């Protein structure tokens, strides 16, 4: 549990499972619930998620499509609505918290903070922070087309590895 917005979608098992379904040709939905110290009622979030999913199913997603749904941390009567969003591509400073499991073995928990305090309108993180359900259409092709075209023009012929 926890919101899967911005760069966090790359670390998310929830989103990864939906990506796998999309790769197999199934329309897929990843649903996550933001948890905060102020509110964390997963049961109520599940009811909200069910309504959202039923609406999505009614519209029949295309094969291989992928939606990332994030529900804000608040009672359903305080959710302001739904926003269709883009992934927020923000800077993230990773830190790791060393912890110990019940068996006494050490493990590391990914922590971190956003480097940027700027919240871009129309993004998943902005919508959830403002109390809206965020629905972000995703794809698993992470190719940077602009950079692809640029490095394709580089001269690679003088490398001595061929």
Image (spheres, helix red, strand yellow):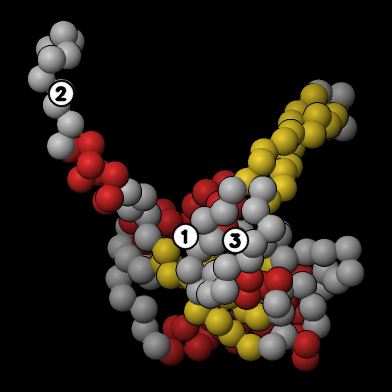
Q: Quadrant of the rendered structure where residue 126 is?
A: bottom right
Q: CA distance from mark 1 to mark 3?
A: 14 Å
* Foreground disc of the pair 2, 1: 2
Locate residue 67, reporting x and y percent: 46, 70
Give the labeled residue for mark 1: 18
Q: Residue at the location (23% across, 36% down)?
A: 151
* Foreground disc of the pair 1, 3: 3
Locate residue 55, reporting x and y percent: 50, 88
Q: Quadrant of the rendered structure where residue 69 is?
A: bottom right
Pointer 1: residues within 10 angstroms few (<14), some, or many (20+)? many
User: Which label belongs to residue 107?
Assistant: none
Give the labeled residue for mark 2: 156
Locate residue 28, reporting x and y percent: 43, 68
Pointer 2: residues within 10 angstroms few (<14), some, or many (20+)? few
Q: Quick check: 43 left or right of 153?
A: right
Residue 80 visible in the snapshot: yes
**Quadrant into which the N terminus falls:** bottom right
Q: CA distance from mark 3 to mark 2?
A: 37 Å
Query: From the viewer's perspective, is residue 105 above or below residue 144?
Result: above
For marks 3 and 2, the one nearer the N-term is 3
Q: Secondary structure at mark 1?
A: helix
Nearer-the-camera pick, 155 or 110: 155
Q: Quick check: 56 left or right of 64?
A: right
Residue 46 visible in the snapshot: no
For marks 1 and 3, the one nearer the N-term is 3
Q: Residue at the location (57% across, 74% down)?
A: 121
Query: From the viewer's perspective, is residue 140 above or below residue 154?
Result: below
Q: Quadrant of the rendered structure where residue 33 is?
A: bottom right
Nearer-the-camera pick, 87 or 137: 87
Q: Residue at the location (43% across, 70% down)?
A: 137
Give the labeled residue for mark 3: 5
């Amino acid at each position: 549990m926890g919101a899967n917005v911005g760069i966090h979608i790359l670390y998310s098992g929830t989103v990864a499972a939906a990506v796998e379904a999309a790769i197999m040709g199934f329309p897929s939905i990843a649903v996550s619930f933001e948890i905060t110290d102020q509110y964390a009622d997963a049961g109520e979030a599940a009811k909200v998620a069910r309504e959202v999913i039923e609406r999505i199913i009614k519209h029949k997603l295309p094969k291989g499509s992928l939606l990332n749904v994030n529900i804000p941390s608040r009672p359903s009567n305080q959710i302001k609505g739904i926003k269709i969003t883009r992934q927020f591509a923000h800077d993230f400073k990773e830190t790791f918290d060393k912890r110990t499991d019940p068996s006494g073995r050490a493990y590391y928990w990914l922590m971190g903070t956003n480097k940027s305090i700027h919240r871009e309108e129309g993004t998943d993180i902005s919508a959830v922070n403002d109390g809206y359900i965020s629905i972000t259409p995703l794809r698993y092709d992470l190719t940077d087309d602009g950079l692809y075209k640029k490095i394709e023009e580089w001269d690679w012929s003088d490398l001595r590895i061929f």
